[in-house]
Image: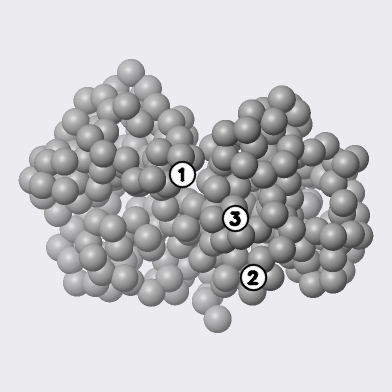
Amino acid sequence: MRAFLFANPAAHSRSPAMHNAAFGVAGFAAVYQALQVLPEDLPAAIASLRSQGVLGANLSLPHKEAALPLLDELTPAARVIGAVNTIINRAGVLVGDNTDAPGFLEALNMASAPQRGRAVVLGAGGAARAAVWALLSEGWAVRVVNRTAGKAVALTEDLGGLACTLDTVPWPEIDLIVNASSAGLDAPEQSPLPEVPALAPGALVYDMVYKPAETRLMRDARAAGYRAENGLGMLAQQARLAFLAWTGTDVPVRVFLEALGVQAA
Ligand code: ATR
């Protein structure tokens, strides 16, 4: 059996390490392979997943949105978020799913985030859409702030929540900040927040960025006395949920975390 990642670039992906470790633990004779797929080759790559012996694939940049019209079915999460990170081959029928959103919620649980409250999501791309959809589904009040304000407005018109600017967020009431922007990605000194303001007691800052493992936003949050987590937990949980969808086997998240070099508690 085989499963794939389609991405461009694909070489530095950490998904093969996670899924191949999980195949080993689950006792499956299967291989997960990361393939560099150019945008013009995506339709053929997706069509090839209908073959017998193929469990499915993960999609990453830049294919998560482009794949939607190429699939036979979409889960409600994938349809509403407008992004697919996992394709499941069900006997030749390709189902597009989004495990980023539930994976994000599982990661919040692992980080002992407040159960529900007021959240600010920074960013308005596909990752932000997954976070906003997930938080709203759990009853959070969600504000969205984006560098390009109009995109935050469009996102909230589409999914719900309230578009804000940094100046109009009631920071002392905020229990959770989620960085779903690419600020800080491969840029240790870049932050989507010029400074971390006073937040609600016990607030958590969740940065979806995991490279570097500690971003400037996380450092600033810790210096201000708040808890901060990087995106490795979400990376592991979205992989665990994709693996579960492909195989029906729920391999413990610890296996995925260890493949990422994180010692699970
Ligand atoms: P993804 O699919 O991972 O969400 P994306 O759709 O490219 O990626 O979205 C990237 C997000 O990061 C956008 O919200 C972008 O803001 P703009 O809409 O203004 O482009 C945000 N972003 C990128 N670099 C940023 C930076 N240096 N500071 C703040 N926001 C940034």
CA–CA distance in space, label 1 to label 2: 34 Å
Above or below for 236 versus 155: below
- At a point 89% along the width and 59% down the height, the residue shown is 172
Give how far apart the Cα atoms at labels 3 and 2 are. Answer: 10 Å
Crowding at mark 2 (Cα within 10 Å: few <14, some 14-19, many 20+): few
Q: Residue 223, percent across and down?
A: 87, 64
**Residue under numbered circle 1:** 12
How busy is the neighbourhood of tag 3: few (under 14 within 10 Å), some, or many (20 plus)? many
Contact flag, marks 3 and 1 (Cβ < 8 Å): no
Q: CA distance from mark 3 to mark 1?
A: 29 Å
Residue 66: which quarter of the image?
Answer: top left
Q: Nearer the viewer, residue 148 or 260?
A: 148
Q: Residue at point 74% right, 58% down?
A: 118
> Is residue 231 something that shows in the picture?
no
- Residue 147, quarter of picture: top right
Whether residue 230 sits left or right of residue 85 in the image: it is: right
Q: Residue at x 27, y 52 (%)?
A: 32
**Which residue has dot 3 on it?**
135
Badge number at residue 115: 2
* Vertical position of residue 154 compared to residue 97: above or below: above
Three-letter amino acid code at disc 2?
Gln
- Identify the image quadrant of the C terminus: bottom right
Image: 135 above or below 81: below
